[in-house]
Structure formats: C-alpha cells, structure tokens
Image: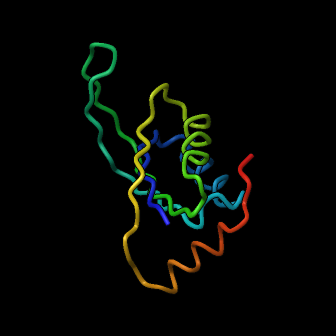
C-alpha cells in the first residue's frame, strides 16, 4: 500500500478524488482543505490556496496511478509524492489491497 500526497486547486479536486475511487484506483481519498502553498514557478514566487489529497492505493506498479493523476491534474508540474506505508491496522491495509485488487487503470 502507498499513500500518495497531491496538492490540488480546490476546483476539480473532488472530481479527481471521486474518479480515482470509482475506477478502483484508490480505496480512499481524503481531501484536506485550507492548504497554502508558497512556491517558485517560472521565476516568480506564487502563493496559492489549495487542498491536499491523501490517496490510499495498492495499484502496482505505482507509476501507473502517478501518470493518471498527472494527466488529470490542471498543473503542468503537479506535486505527486508517494510514501510507502510500512505498517498500520491490518484490517485497513487488507481492505485497501482488496479494494484495488485487479484494477487496470484507464
């Protein structure tokens, strides 16, 4: 199982999250509002209000879901960071694995 962290503009975040879950690519996506990102882009300092998506997935290889997120994200260079889950509640980890089992991303 992996935890995928994605910063996203508020508009469209729910569509991305819902699509990943409905297609079986993610077992669950948390949308955390109120993130503020300050970053450099094309020589300028940007300051944006965003949401953070915490995506729980067991899709293998993980590069497939990263590609899908990047294609559906409105930014040219979106933040997509994968954190391996080392341990957790066994029932929950099994549920994530079973929910994503056998899914072929579009």
Q: Is residue 68 above or below residue 96?
A: above
Residue 82 point in image, percent of width and height: 42, 52
Q: Is residue 47 above or below residue 16?
A: above
Residue 26 point in image, percent of width and height: 60, 61
Q: Is residue 9 above or below residue 88?
A: above
Total marks drawn? Answer: 0
Residue at the spot x=60%, y=57% of the render? Answer: 60
Q: Is residue 93 above or below residue 65?
A: below
Residue at the spot x=49%, y=29% of the render? Answer: 75
Residue at the spot x=51%, y=63% of the render? Answer: 56
Left or right: residue 103 compared with residue 12: right
Q: Nearer the viewer, residue 67 or 17?
A: 67
Residue 49 point in image, percent of width and height: 35, 39
Q: Nearer the viewer, residue 95 or 11?
A: 95
Left or right: residue 18 compared with residue 77: right
| Color style of the picture | rainbow
Q: Nearer the viewer, residue 30 or 55?
A: 55
Residue at the spot x=40%, y=51% of the render? Answer: 52
Residue 6 point in image, percent of width and height: 44, 47
Q: Residue furthest front?
A: 61
Q: Residue 54: which quarter of the image? A: bottom left
Left or right: residue 20 compared with residue 57: right
């Amino acid at each position: 199982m992996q935890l995928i962290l994605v910063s996203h503009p508020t508009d469209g975040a729910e569509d991305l999250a819902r699509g990943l879950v409905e297609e079986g690519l993610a077992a669950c996506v948390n949308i955390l509002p109120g993130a503020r990102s300050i970053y450099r882009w094309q020589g300028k300092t940007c300051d944006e209000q965003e949401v953070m998506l915490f995506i729980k997935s067991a899709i293998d290889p993980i590069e497939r879901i990263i590609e899908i997120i990047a294609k559906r994200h409105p930014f040219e260079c979106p933040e997509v960071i994968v954190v391996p889950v080392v341990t957790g509640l066994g029932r929950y980890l099994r549920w994530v694995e079973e929910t994503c089992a056998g899914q072929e991303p579009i």
